[in-house]
Image (cartoon, rainbow, N blue to C red):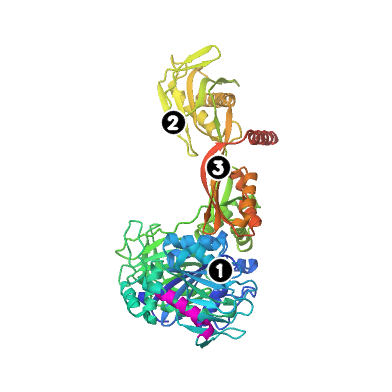
């Protein structure tokens, strides 16, 4: 295989909503470039992209697939990304290591929420975008309607490259206004017939060609002057103008294809090979230290590891982009992320399961290697005298949670090993061993995302696991002051146990004045603060303890034990066993015994006194509230709002977002347990949402009473 230089390499991500035809398009692209001799189908379970057993089982892409083709003297690396929102992490990763996004649109459905979401990601990452209208041969394909939607959503940067003459089941021809030719295909697609544009289409084609020339000229002053002088540009000049427009996102070209019949695919490949930016045309990425790293083949060697998989008969495969320098087999590199060393024994170009060993990869290229010792997704590997470190991929927050446990308790350690490995493959799977909830919590992007993990653990690793609804990390606090005392006394022969603690508790508020005097009934309690401990709590809030002991009622050496007793109850609140927060305690009196008093006695006395006072201080349970944003077609807005209100959600606002409705709400985490499934059901999978923790708020009284009752019943059973 030829060694391609940086200025001969193009990196492209295939993106789009679920069902838009990315895998089918990838198959046609590989076929047109001669990489495969026969096109597979999703239905036939024989495509290059969907090669893993779980993908064949479910019938859709779960992983991104790295592929390449040699075409027109250039190397085109492209990554086919899953369309389902649950697997958005793959698309985000792919866009970060490629330079252009080809967004497919199902011409029967037009612009979908998934289209909008992925476009936002390209916007954030400042990546060029090309739209490909696929399935133009579909029963419901409506070209004009889809173009109208594109302009509505993405503005006047939408530029027509091609338009079909007969969208729908009879689709077999289109006009290319860049080359000003008519393309026609037979019933089975393949090689087109290229003709002059028919007279009846010439006016429309000329109008669109003129708009395209004008859009290309706008990106270069020289071209603009020539356009004004001559009224036209050469094909090469148009290519250069469009390339510059792609780089600065002032042009979004639109192509027409039927990937299933291989119509228009080769023409789009020609555009990708001739027009879209090369690696070195794009802005250089920056290291974590803000150093700009240009893709120079003679620069210091640095690799960014963007994907890790475990593949049958091979083991762990690590995919990388050469950020700088030239990579050859046998080189020793430093893993600057993990502080370890690696030897790259062999390097490969990858096309799905097909791996071809090569002798060299230059800056900007994408490749893979195997059998690395200590490399994870997101690591940077540097050569000698290089100290680059990259960390530019940002994944969305999880929005679906489940508690996970093995069917056999003794397999817990094995399960955690598997989950850790799978998180390294896909960082959007988040695993937390929650000390608070006493559960292993698995979080991801949706039900399908987690179901995929379950399938792989049970089928690949042969470990049966169970998903359960996770417990909610409630918090407990108080609303008023209260007083209590408790005497712990135990005598069982020999030295006994004795400790008595008197304390007052009240809600803690930042900046509140120090306590001076409390009154309960007719009795007044004056505080003489000798010492204060302010303890920030890991789970939020504070515990503030004032030592107000006078006259030696409790020896100072027992105060730490009393604080431990208070913390025992803060870690396991008196109401539901949840963490307590934001409490101020004054220890003002007590008693001790010269022989029987010890640390355990005062720890237990403090714990029980605190519990009594807490229950008398109008305690409240707090629940986590999340900010939720839902992007939904306007047809479904009423149903979505009604469902949110049924989940105790508070609607905070509504706005239009390029043809869709954006609903923002505050919703308790308890009510979000199965929301991704419910939203998909309500809207037919045409909506998406994000959620992020906002605050803790008091639960309604009926919910609190239910929680207290459940906790009491559980303790009775135990």
Per the rendering, the mark at residue 625 is 3
Image quadrant containing the C terminus:
top right
The x, y position of residue 280, in whole percent, is 35, 71
Per the rendering, the mark at residue 146 is 1
The x, y position of residue 112, in whole percent, is 57, 63
Q: Was residue 199 drawn as part of the magenta stretch in this picture?
A: yes
Secondary structure found at label 3:
strand
The x, y position of residue 111, in whole percent, is 55, 65
Q: Nearer the viewer, mark 2 or mark 1?
A: 1
Per the rendering, the mark at residue 485 is none
> In the rendered image, is residue 672 in sight?
yes
Disc 2 versus disc 1: distance between alpha carbons? 56 Å
Query: First in sequence: mark 1 or mark 3?
Result: 1
Judge from the rendering whether residue 1 lies leftward or rightward of residue 443; answer left or right. left
Image quadrant containing the N terminus:
bottom left
- Residue marked by disc 2: 510
Q: Are marks 2 and 1 in contact (CB under 8 Å)?
A: no
Magenta residues, start to end: 197-213
Q: Are marks 3 and 2 in contact (CB under 8 Å)?
A: no
């Amino acid at each position: 295989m030829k060694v391609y230089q940086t200025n001969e390499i193009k990196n492209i991500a295939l993106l789009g909503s679920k069902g838009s035809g990315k895998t089918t398009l990838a198959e046609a692209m590989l076929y047109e470039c001669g990489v495969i001799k026969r096109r597979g189908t999703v239905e036939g379970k024989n495509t290059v992209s969907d090669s893993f057993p779980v993908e064949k089982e479910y019938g859709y892409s779960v992983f991104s697939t790295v592929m390449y083709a040699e075409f027109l003297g250039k190397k085109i690396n492209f990554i086919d990304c899953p369309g389902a929102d649950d697997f958005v992490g793959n698309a985000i990763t792919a866009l970060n290591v490629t330079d252009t996004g080809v967004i497919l649109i199902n011409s029967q459905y037009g612009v979908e929420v998934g289209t909008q979401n992925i476009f936002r990601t390209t916007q954030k990452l400042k990546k060029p975008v090309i739209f490909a209208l696929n399935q133009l041969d579909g029963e419901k394909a409506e070209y004009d309607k889809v173009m109208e939607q594109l302009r509505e959503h993405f503005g006047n940067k939408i530029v027509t490259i091609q338009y079909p003459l007969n969208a729908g089941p009879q689709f077999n021809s289109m006009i290319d206004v860049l080359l000003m030719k008519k393309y026609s295909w037979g019933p089975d697609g393949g090689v087109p017939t290229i003709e002059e544009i028919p007279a009846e289409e010439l006016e429309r084609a000329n109008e669109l060609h003129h708009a395209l020339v004008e859009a290309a000229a706008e990106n270069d002053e020289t071209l603009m002057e020539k356009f004004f002088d001559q009224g036209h540009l050469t094909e090469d000049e148009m290519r250069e103008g469009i390339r510059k427009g792609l780089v600065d996102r002032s042009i979004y070209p639109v192509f027409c294809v039927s990937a299933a019949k291989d119509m228009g695919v080769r023409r789009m490949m020609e555009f990708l090979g001739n027009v879209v930016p090369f690696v070195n045309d794009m802005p250089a990425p920056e290291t974590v230290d803000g150093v700009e790293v240009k893709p120079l083949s003679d620069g210091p060697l640095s690799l960014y590891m963007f994907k890790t998989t475990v593949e049958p008969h091979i083991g762990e495969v690590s995919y990388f982009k050469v950020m700088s320098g030239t990579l050859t087999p046998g080189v020793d590199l430093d893993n600057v992320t993990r502080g370890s060393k690696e030897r790259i024994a062999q390097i490969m170009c990858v096309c799905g399961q097909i791996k071809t060993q090569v002798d060299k990869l230059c800056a900007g290229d994408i490749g893979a290697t195997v059998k690395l010792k200590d490399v994870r997704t997101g690591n940077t590997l540097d050569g000698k005298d290089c100290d680059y470190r990259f960390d530019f991929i940002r994944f969305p927050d999880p929005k679906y949670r489940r508690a996970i446990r093995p069917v056999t308790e003794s397999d817990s350690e094995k399960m955690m090993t598997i989950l850790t490995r799978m998180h390294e493959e896909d960082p959007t799977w988040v695993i937390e061993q929650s000390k608070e909830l006493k559960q292993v919590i698995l979080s991801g992007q949706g039900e399908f995302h987690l179901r995929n993990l379950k399938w792989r653990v049970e089928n690949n690793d042969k470990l049966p696991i169970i998903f359960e609804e996770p417990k909610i990390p409630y918090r407990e606090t108080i609303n008023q002051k209260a007083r209590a005392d408790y005497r712990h006394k135990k005598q069982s022969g020999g030295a006994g146990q004795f400790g008595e603690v008197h304390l007052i508790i009240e809600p803690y508020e930042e900046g509140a004045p120090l306590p001076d005097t409390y009154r309960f009934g007719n009795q007044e309690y004056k505080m003489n603060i000798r010492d204060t401990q302010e303890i920030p709590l890991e789970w939020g809030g504070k515990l503030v303890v004032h030592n107000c002991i006078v006259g030696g009622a409790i020896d100072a050496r027992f105060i730490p034990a009393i604080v431990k007793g208070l913390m025992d109850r803060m870690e396991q609140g008196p109401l539901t066993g949840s963490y307590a927060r934001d409490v101020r305690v004054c220890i003002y009196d007590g008693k001790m015994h010269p022989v029987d008093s010890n640390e355990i006695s005062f720890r237990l006395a403090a714990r029980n006194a605190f519990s009594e006072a807490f229950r008398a201080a109008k305690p409240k349970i707090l629940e986590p509230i999340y900010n939720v944003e839902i992007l939904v077609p306007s047809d479904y807005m009423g149903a979505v709002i009604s469902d949110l209100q049924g989940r105790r959600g508070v609607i905070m606002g509504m706005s239009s977002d390029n043809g869709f409705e954006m609903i923002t709400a505050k919703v308790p985490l308890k009510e979000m347990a199965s929301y991704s499934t419910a939203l998909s059901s309500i809207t037919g999978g045409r909506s998406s949402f994000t959620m992020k923790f906002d605050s803790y708020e008091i639960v309604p009284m009926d919910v609190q009473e239910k929680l207290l009752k459940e906790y009491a019943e559980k303790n009775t059973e135990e």
